[in-house]
Every structure is written in C-alpha cells, then in structure tokens.
Amino acid sequence: MWKRGQQRVWYLHIVFLLVNVVIELKYANFFQQADRLADNSFNVIMLDMPWGKFGPSSNHPDVQWDHLPPINRLGEMVDELLEPNGYAIIFGDREHLDLVDDLWSPLFTVRDQLIWAKPGNIPTNSLKPIPVHEFIHIYMRKDLKVNKCTWNPRVSPGKPYIRKGTSGSVSTRRQAKSARHENATGMRHLKSVIYAPNKPAMRGWEKSGHPTMKPVQLLSQIIRAYSNPGDSVLDPFSGSGSTALTCFLTGRKCISYENNSKWFQQSITRFNRVKKMLGTGQVEQLLRQPELQIDEFDMTLLYPQ
C-alpha cells in the first residue's frame, strides 16, 4: 500500500525480451529524486515550471503547488542531466524568461524564441488586455554551434499539396511547366508563433482542469522540431502530463515528475482516455515507435475536423 512520502510510479511499457519502459509518470519531487538519474541522459528537458503567480498567498487548494523553484540550482541540474547537444525548453512570461536568461547565461544561450498564441483565453484582470500568448525559450549550451543540435523544421500540420513550379528565369519557367513539387504529408516549416487552443477550446480527452496545462497540439510541434524519434525527454514539473502524453504519441521516451496527487492522477486519467480512444492495436504500435525510432502517428485521429 502506498503511503505519504513514498514514490509512486505509473509505467507505460512494451515487452520484447526485456521490459522496455517508454513512459514513466512519477509521483515524486524532482529535486529529491534527480540524483537517481544518469548524467547527460536526456535529449530534451521540458520546463513548464511554477512561477509563484498564484501561491503561496492564494488560499485556493488547486494552486498551493505554485512556488518558484531555485532557478540557479535548476540550471546546474539541467546542465548535468542534459546530453551535450540537447535542449532545455522553458515556458513563461517575459519577466520570468528574462530572469532565466540572466541566471543561466554562464551555461546556456537562447537558440530560439517562440510564442504560443492561445485563442480561447478568458479575462483574468479587468484592468488589462486578455492574455492570449505565452513565451517559450529554447536553450542550448553556450559553447555549442546551432548546426550541431537537432532541428526538424517540418512539424506544423497543414494540407498535402501538389504544385507546379513557375518562378525563376524564363528558361527555368519553361523547364518547370512539367515539374511537380509534392508535399504528401502537408507538414509545414515551424513558425515562431504557434497557434494552439487554450483550455476553453481543448478537446474533451485533453482537458484536465490544471490552470497552466499545455495542449498536445502545441507540444507535439516543439518536441518534433527539437528532438528525434527514440530520444529521451525529461519533465520535472509535469502537471497533468501533457509532455509525457505528447512523447507517447510522437515516438519519444519520457520520465516525468509531479508531486501533487491530484494532477498525478489526472495524468493517468488522460492517458487512459487516449488509450481507449485509439484502441489496443494503435497503442501497441505507438509503444514500439521509440524502439524503432519512428514517428508516424497521425494527429488528425485525435483532432478530427
């Protein structure tokens, strides 16, 4: 029987000759458990961390977890756990990310700055505009060159097309009359502004009630762009499990930590919803993706038009 203070872990795995763990959801405090993780073992570390915006002054029970972690210590831990060419990806407001940029500057530099445009948001302050965006910084090691890091730009969903080329010189245009450019998958180059629904516009299977949860539509583009199938992702502040769920769908392995029992249970509930939607056969295929280093899941199965 599980008791308070003990670690509780939910595994999603497949069995070959050995047990190959694909997803680990840990009910534990990351700072207390990080020394059990191997150095340089993660390709991506996702940090959607609490910034202290709600608590500890708030009396609302759902936001008592919202305490700012030690940013300097976190940076040192990321430096130890991240593989040499890996990324740390942080979500937050401008003031929060400016703080991280400054404190982490001896170790990391910002490779990319993204913006999550989240339609469907609701007013939070009658004296200010409705917040419909959030900043995302992609950090890499300071001494690393950009071309040494993983970069898969075609990750944004779109419609497949076949197009004839018409640009260029006259001779080129003549040659291009019969030329065809085909995009069979419809995937487009990642843009610095990513449009994905916020909580009020999310699908039923995706909702959890967590006040700062991120949609799979957003995370799938980021994880696919900055990692490869079969890579390992760490999420120290997993909330209701969006990162782990996205890794499951896109062929990445993931270890996540959450020390709030409500959100830990929500993570399991969301996984079970998706498994039920997809069926046993599709789930087994998804669990084999990291081992085969493939990412072939069609997100439209979860987001039908």
Image: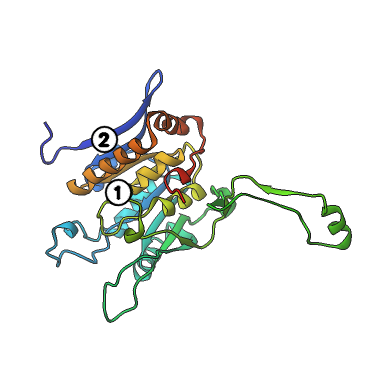
Whole-angstrom CA distance, mark 1 to mark 2, is 13 Å
Q: Residue at x 43, y 58 (%)?
A: 196
Q: Residue at x 31, y 54 (%)?
A: 74
The quadrant in which residue 245 appears is: top left
Q: Which mark is drawn over residue 238?
A: 1
Q: Is residue 188 left or right of residue 1?
A: right
In the rendered image, which quarter contains the N terminus?
A: top left
Can see residue 95?
yes
Q: Which type of secondary structure does the marked residue at label 2 adopt?
A: strand
Q: Residue at x 25, y 40 (%)?
A: 26
- Residue 144's spot in the image, x, y percent? 53, 53
Mark 1 and mark 2 lie on one chain; the one further toward the N terminus is: 2
* Amino acid on which disc 1 is placed: Ser
- Of residues 162 and 258, which is closer to you in this image? 162
Residue at the extreme right of the image, as rendered: 171
Q: Is residue 78 left or right of residue 174?
A: left
Residue at the extreme bottom of the image, as rendered: 127
Q: Is residue 124 above or below residue 13?
A: below
* Amino acid on which disc 2 is placed: Trp
Q: Is residue 190 above or below residue 38?
A: below
Q: Residue at x 24, y 35 (%)?
A: 9
Q: Which residue is mark 2?
A: 10
- Of residues 178 and 217, which is closer to you in this image? 178
Q: Is residue 277 above or below residue 61?
A: above
Q: How many marks?
A: 2
- Of residues 199 and 79, which is closer to you in this image? 199
Q: Are marks 1 and 2 in contact (CB under 8 Å)?
A: no
